[in-house]
Image: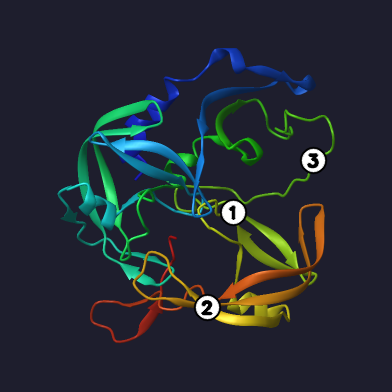
Amino acid sequence: MLGRLICLLAAVAVFATSDTTFAQDAKKCRLQKVVEWKVRSIGRHMAVDGAINGKKIGIVLDTGAWASLLFRASAQRLDLDLKEALGERAFGVGGETKVYTTVVDEFKLGEAAVRGLQLRVAGERDPGEGFDLLLGEDFLRNFDIEFDLANDIVRLWQPKDCDGVSLAYWTKDVVGEAAIERITDSKRKIEFTVQLNGKPVHAFLDSGASTSMVSKHDAEAVGAKTIGATVGTSGLGAKSVDVWIGKFASFAIGNEEIADVEIRVADIYQGATYQATGSRIARAARVTR
């Protein structure tokens, strides 16, 4: 998907503002602000206004999505022609979803516009009006992202000579930090380690999620207590996944620790299996969302 968004990346870069560049201490770290978006909330999701062929859409900023995609229900509302992406499969919360492609005459993201952009289309459920496109890590990984949620703003930065330097330019105080794993073309999620009940648990930052969630396997491994009634949640797949509340004695990330926390727990990968051609053995799939 990165190749399909390269023209959009160039279009966004056109709006880089030279007067926002500043120096960082003796390291000579410099940050160039590429763009600043005003974001709005769609059901606890951060969205930027955009448009496809002149029709307004909501673009959700989703660091948890391996690739950017347009929801199929939105593509149908926009009267777009879909072509099945043969040989391509996608899995998310709720199981597998068919993948299609479409080419839009004009795509706008904020003030940037490109023509003839090919988009991946998926999703078995309609997420609702205004929740149309996930802008995933194939695009977002090209920038350093600042989520200024107190002011409903997201900023994209291009750092230069900033290795080992804190990018928290807004304060001179010590800030909380967590080391993240290296992001590559085959591993695009923002992954790191947290502590639940004093035990290490693999985690990733998902700005497209409406709430934090722990997998059933990890919750059981750290001895979480189950409280509250079971409810259902869904994602890209057609199936619902059971969710309940887990009680944890402690949660820690970086140098921050919170005692007695309640976090939703789910069998996140329930239904995310497939059978290879010529086999009846179900295999676990890599969940992209």
Mark 1, residue position? 205
**Location of residue 171 in the rendering, given as x and y in whole percent from the top left corner:** 79, 30
Instruction: Name the residue: 56% across, 24% down.
Output: 33
Q: Secondary structure at mark 3?
A: loop
Label 2 belongs to which residue? 231
Query: The disc labelled 2 sits on which kind of residue?
Result: Val
Q: Residues within 10 Å of mark 1 (few under 14, many from 20)?
A: some
Which circle, 2 or 3, is nearer the viewer?
2
Instruction: Give the image location of residue 35, x and y in percent.
Output: 50, 26
Q: Amino acid at mark 1?
A: Leu
Q: How many residues crowd around disc 2 within 10 Å: few (fewer than 14), some, or many (20 or more)?
A: few
Q: Earlier in the sequence, mark 1 or mark 3?
A: 3
Q: Is residue 60 above or below residue 162?
A: below
Q: How is the image coloured?
A: rainbow
Q: Do tag 1 and tag 3 residues touch (Cβ < 8 Å)?
A: no
Q: Which residue ends up furthest to the bottom in the rendered image?
A: 280
Name the disc covering residue 175, or none: 3
Q: Residue at 77% across / 53% down in the picture?
A: 254
| Contact check, label 1 and label 2, Cβ < 8 Å | no
Depth check, front residue: 45 or 238? 45
User: How far, Cα to Cα, is label 2 from label 3?
Assistant: 36 Å
Screen quadrant of the C terminus: bottom left
Image location (x, y in percent) of residue 78 = 22, 46
Q: Position of residue 190 (x, y in %)?
A: 57, 51
Judge from the rendering whether residue 49 lies leftward or rightward of residue 215; answer left or right: left
